[in-house]
Image (cartoon, rainbow, N blue to C red):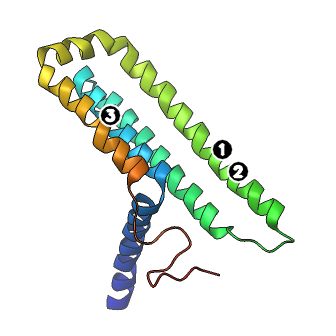
Amino acid sequence: MKSEIKRFGRGFVYAWNGILAAVHQERNFRFHLCAACYALAACWLAELSRVEWALILFCIAAVLAMELMNSAVERAVDKPDTTHWWSAGAAKDMAAGAVLITALGALVIGCCLLLPQLSKIMDRLLAMPWLGILLLAALIPAYLFIFRYHNATQKGETTNGKTDS
């Protein structure tokens, strides 16, 4: 019984390690994290209802989950043998397409919920100019996090610096 609980708990550790690996090694995952932060700020400014918040949070979770699945597929089919290279490329393209469809769906839902609230968002930003400045200034670290962040271990490398083969 104790070992089953221990194995169950270890599954959460593995899941957390997968999320951290995506943050460290996947530029698109970092982009979606930053986009989620700005979406959440817009939702707060728009004073959305609980149901609208739940819908936005579900969209964010769906996009991040799809990005994790895309990364997993990319890793699983990376460096295929010559007889499987075409199917590996197709699998990677399909996984990327799934992320795109999910992200576009989330964008449409976000626009449906936030565009009618645009005047309220602008009024609140004008009432709190420091927040507008903070959100604009946060674009710089967001850019650096998305495009300039790098980890000592890149895709395909192990912690000892050797590449997976």
Residue 92: x, y in percent?
69, 56
Residue pictured at 43% horizontal, 48% vertical: 147
Element class at badge 2: helix
Identify the residue position indicated by label 3 in the image.
38
Quarter residue 49 falls in? top left
Q: Label 3 near label 2: C-beta < 8 Å?
A: no
Q: Quadrant of the C terminus?
A: bottom right
Q: Label 2 near label 1: C-beta < 8 Å?
A: yes
How many angstroms separate mark 2 from mark 3 (CA)? 28 Å
What number is the disc on residue 93? 2
On screen, 155 above or below 53? below
The residue type indicated by label 2 comes to Asp
Crowding near the residue tagged with mark 1, few <14, some 14–19, many ≥20 C-alpha atoms within 10 Å: some
Residue pictured at 40% horizontal, 66% vertical: 151
Mark before the other along the chain sequence, 2 or 3? 3
What number is the disc on residue 97? 1
Element class at badge 3: helix
How many angstroms separate mark 1 from mark 2 (CA)? 6 Å
Residue 121: x, y in percent?
26, 17
Residue pictured at 40% horizontal, 71% vertical: 152
Q: Quadrant of the N terminus?
A: bottom left
The residue type indicated by label 1 comes to Gly
The residue type indicated by label 3 comes to Tyr
Residue sitting farthest toward the right: 83
